[in-house]
Image: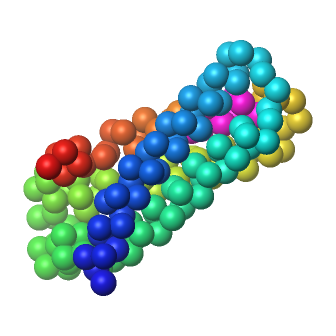
Amino acid sequence: MFETIQFIHSYWAYVTLLLVVLATLNALKGLFAKSEFSQNDFRTSLFALVVTHIQIILGLFLFIYSPNAMGAIKGSGMGAVMKDSMLRFSTIEHPLMMIIAVVLITIGYSKHKKKVDSNSKFKVIAIFYSIALLLILSRIPWGTWFN
């Protein structure tokens, strides 16, 4: 079961990244073009929110049951994990940045619903989704993506 979840998490990441990029670009386009916020804009940001939540649930499952994450912390201790850059990346940096990114996307999505005018909606989504996208891009395990 662990391998199946890991497989899904690995490939769902492509869908997640694609939709977050699309939602971010859509919000930036709407902001700079001063467009009206439409149902398609709403759906794009909503789909990005949903796929990131699915991805984080899969990732948290892997974090808890992975021998490389909690297993490494339990087995070697946090000090050893922090000294090993690869282990620190997979155990601490990647999960933490992804959690923060999902929180930012959730906050941005929630805040945009409270805004009345289209420009404010696009601005909130553009800011929060852009920061989240930067965090995601900074902590993707690129080496494993292209092997």
Rendered residue at 43%/35% (across/down)? 134
The N terminus is located in which quarter? bottom left
Provide residue 116's location: percent of width, then percent of height.
89, 35
Provide residue 3's location: percent of width, then percent of height.
25, 76
Q: Give the left or right position of residue 137, taking residue 141 as reference.
A: right
Rendered residue at 30%/52% (across/down)? 93
Count of numbered tags: 0
Residue at the far front: name it. Answer: 40
Rendered residue at 70%/22% (across/down)? 31
| Above or below, 8 relative to 39 | below
Provide residue 8's location: percent of width, then percent of height.
36, 67
Question: 11 or 133, which is in the foreground?
Answer: 11
Can residue 68 be found in the magenta stretch? no
Provide residue 45's location: percent of width, then percent of height.
65, 44
Residue 63 in view in this figure: no
Q: Main secondary structure of the magenta part?
A: helix
Q: Give the left or right position of residue 50, taking residue 39 as reference.
A: left
Rendered residue at 51%/64% (across/down)? 54
| Above or below, 143 relative to 51 | above
Q: Which range is magenta?
A: 121-129
Q: Give the left or right position of residue 89, taking residue 13 as reference.
A: left
Question: 144 or 91, which is in the foreground?
Answer: 144
Residue at the far top: name it. Answer: 33
